[in-house]
Image (cartoon, helix red, strand yellow):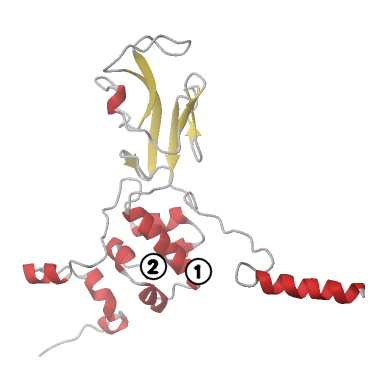
Amino acid sequence: MITRNPNVSSVPSFLFPCLIRPYRSLRTLHGKATAAHIPPPTPFVPDAKTFLTLIGRGLSQHTSKIPNWDGLFSLSSSQLRELGLEPARDRRYLLWWRDKFRKGEYGIGGDLQYVQDGVAEVRVVEVPKSTGKRPATVTTSPGMKKVIVNLPPEQDSTGLLAEEVKRIAGMKIQGAQTIVGSYLEPLKGANGSVARIKVQEGMWEERRGHKVDGGERRKANVRSKRAAAERAKNR
């Protein structure tokens, strides 16, 4: 006797590939070659919920509608609409951020490698330069350079070279050793040289612009009517 799962009928058919990972033959892989690229999660953005939280505009309220990470990056605009992600401008915004993430274009914190429970620690360290002679300054020793690093709390900067340290986007050193950047929380007692950053709602949000005279599509018409009304008033 064949039994049916009563919950299957409630799931849209286009979500099956996101929920099930069947064995894929070479022929199947060839047929999927043109499918949209699904980037791997990052330590700061490990799942769909975090992604929607970071990009803001209230999209985190739709977390339950996105089945998983693969679904986040593979569902089309029409499929998202069928799942109830409205209005259309929110879908366009999500698709825009998906494309940016695929290209490795993140907001602050997106390039951090050591993250625990959504929190990362950054600190200023002094590391040697491998080439050239860097003169001493008021804040730096000769042959050394101050950089911001994201390392595990128990690891020090021994063995690091300035040229090997990748710059962390959205952060910089101000003065002798103070780390500055959006959403950074300085640690007490560290004099600004150590800070933490954690996932927050809207950290990567691109703010909406304000429409002027009805926006680009209606601007000419609105201004024309206004000018006509002013001429009629001055007669």
Viewer-side residue, 58 vs 94: 94
Viewer-side residue, 24 vs 118: 24
Residue 155 seen from this side: no
Helix, strand or loop under label 1 = helix
Most distant residue in the bottom direction: 1
Viewer-side residue, 135 vs 232: 232
Q: Residue visible at 37% across and 49% down?
A: 105
Q: Is residue 168 above or below residue 188?
A: below
Quarter location, residue 18? bottom left
Q: Which residue is denoted by mark 1 in the rendering? A: 89
Q: Position of residue 152 (x, y in %)?
A: 30, 32
Most distant residue in the left direction: 26
Most distant residue in the right direction: 235
Tell me the amino acid under the disc marked 2.
Ser
- Counting other residues with Cα less than 10 Å from the Cα at mark 2, is it few (<14), some (14-19), or many (20 or more)? few
Q: Residue visible at 28% across and 77% down?
A: 14
Which quadrant: the N terminus?
A: bottom left
Q: Position of residue 204 (x, y in %)?
A: 47, 50
Q: Is residue 148 left or right of residue 229?
A: left
Q: Is residue 134 above or below residue 113?
A: above
Q: Residue visible at 40% across and 42% down?
A: 109
